[in-house]
Amino acid sequence: MKCVIVGYGSIGQRHARILRQLGCSVAVVSRRDIQFPLAYRSLPAALEQEKPDYVVIANKTGEHYNSLTQLAGCAFKGIVLVEKPLFHAAMDIPENCFKKAYVAYNLRFHPIIGKISEIVGRESTLYVQVYVGQYLPDWRPERDYRTVYSAGRDEGGGVLLDLSHELDYLHLLFGDWDSMAAIGGRYGPLEIDSDDMYSMMLTMKKCPMVQLHVNYLDRIGRREITVITENNTLKADLMQQTLQINKDIIHYRLERDYTYHMQHKAVINGEAEPLCTLEKGLAVLEMIRSAEQSARQRMWVDK
């Protein structure tokens, strides 16, 4: 399969490495001078020369919409994967003739999420608590955190967008939301103008009580899920790669690229599940918009 990757930051480099490991021919689009065998300055030039089967949009979040619109305007008929989040705000998906198009929520391919999905699929869920906190300056230690897009609201930064994996897998596991209350904004000492902390309370189709907290401020770094069903209590730690089911603990030992590898493999093999469609990716952005509305108005919001 011939692939073109738009953007060659840290995530673009990861996509390039994995796709080459999978035996794909890979070209990159970047405005910067980069060391890569096949590199182009513009997407139209890459499309004309490479005629790819698969395009990965992995530039800054604030540039996703324009890149996807440009790709659609070039009448691209292959497969598209847009890095999460889909856009920097909820906007209409441009008309296109893509064969298939997905959003790169790779945690859908984590076996812990798969195991939780298996259990909640066969019994009623009563309560869910999700927590993710990661100290923003530690994300890319080689760069000043104040210069990365996460720090800028206008560039698509903000904790709900950056850590939207949690919103996506809540949709995957428990269906759409019915009502929510949220509080959030910029609370910590980081020199950024994007939101650094948000908490949400939700009712969802398959769970009457869901609590979610995300932040840029936790210096330990945690990504945890607690689920109480009618028959089981589940406690997942995605950092430590463990899943406790009542008294039993399952240990996982995944390579860092595992979920990304499995995601690309599913795309290449034409396996739609559990990939995230553009419509599901847009639903995450609409959920974020509702959370921001609730926080501004200090009131519950209905779907």
Image: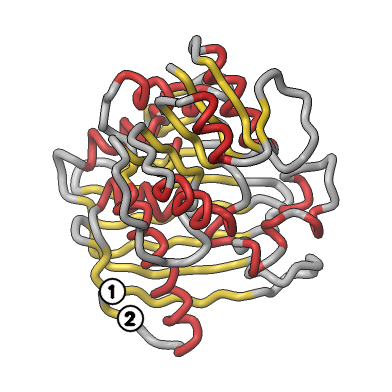
- Evaluate if marks 1 and 2 touch, with contact meaning CB atoms under 8 Å apart: yes
Q: Quadrant of residue 223?
A: top right
Q: Which residue is painted at 22% across and 51% down in the image?
A: 125
Q: Please tell me which residue is depicted at 43% across the width and 72% down the height of the picture.
A: 289
Q: Residue 219, position in %: x, y?
A: 73, 51
- State the CA–CA distance, disc 1 to disc 2: 6 Å
Q: Which residue is mark 1?
A: 179
> In this picture, is 252 found above or below 297?
above
Residue 283 seen? yes
> Residue 142 at what x, y percent from top left?
84, 40
The residue located at (52%, 56%) in the rendering is 66
Asked if residue 119 lies left or right of residue 14, the reply is left
Q: Is residue 78 left or right of residue 52?
A: left
Q: Which quadrant of the figure contains the C terminus?
A: bottom left
Q: Amino acid at mark 1?
A: Ser
Residue 301 — which label?
Answer: 2
